[in-house]
Image (cartoon, rainbow, N blue to C red):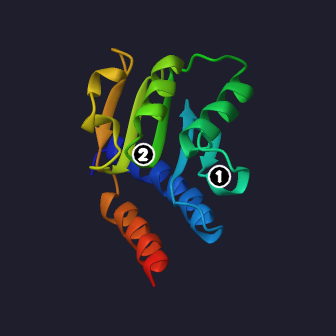
Amino acid sequence: MNVTAQTDEKYMRLALYEAREAFNNDEVPVGAVIVADGVVVGRGRNLTETLTDVTAHAEIQALTAASATLGGKYLPDCTIYVTLEPCVMCAGALAWSQIGRIVYGAADPKRGYTTIDSRILHPKTKVTAGVLATECEALMNEFFSKLRR
């Protein structure tokens, strides 16, 4: 495994921690962390139920935290690690932030941004999909099967 793959897995595990915290609070289990120069500068998890706010997605929470930490709204030197493919709203916010890289775990064939148009991202943003996808998918499946019981 190369250094980039090891690094991606390391930070995706932190995003999975955030997703599990969301799961434990009866939120859809999506977690995100934003990293700059090897330092986590923002964390987020879904808080839509807690805040009764449809925009309180993990990515939005992490973007807000990272911007506050770094003192600016543009994040071209940052990478976001998120357990689920961003939705169109989150992809738009990530585009506005000019984030340098997006790494996500599970694909979202129903609401992921790629089902609409992958051009929504900033043209310089790089994307890596499928990091720890099996673990990310398993957490989502567990959450939704729990709801159906």
SS under mark 1: loop
**Which residue is located at x 41 percent, y 40 percent?**
86
Q: Are the residues flagged by discs 2 and 1 in contact, CB closer than 8 Å?
A: no
Q: Measured along the vertical axis of the image, is residue 124 above or below residue 44?
A: above
* Among the 4 quarters of the image, the one containing residue 26: bottom right
Residue 127 image offset from top left, x and y in percent: 32, 32
* Among the 4 quarters of the image, the one containing residue 135: bottom left
What is the number of the mark on residue 7? 2
Residue positioned most to the bottom: 149
Q: Give, as a three-letter code, the residue at label 1.
A: Leu
Q: Is residue 72 left or right of residue 79?
A: right
**Which residue is located at x 35 percent, y 22 percent?**
120
**Which residue is located at x 51 percent, y 18 percent?**
96
* Among the 4 quarters of the image, the one containing residue 121: top left
From where the camera sits, is residue 57 visible?
Answer: yes
**Which residue is located at x 25 percent, y 38 percent?**
115
Q: Give, as a three-letter code, the residue at label 2.
A: Thr
Residue 36 image offset from top left, x and y in percent: 56, 30
Residue 41 image offset from top left, x and y in percent: 65, 35
Q: Badge 2 local density, few (<14 within 10 Å), some, or many (20+)?
A: few
From where the camera sits, is residue 76 visible?
Answer: no
From the image, tell me which residue sits under label 1: 47
Q: CA distance from mark 2 to mark 1?
A: 27 Å
SS under mark 2: helix
Of 27 and 33, which appears nearest the observer? 27
Of 149 and 83, which appears nearest the observer? 149
Residue 106 image offset from top left, x and y in percent: 33, 54
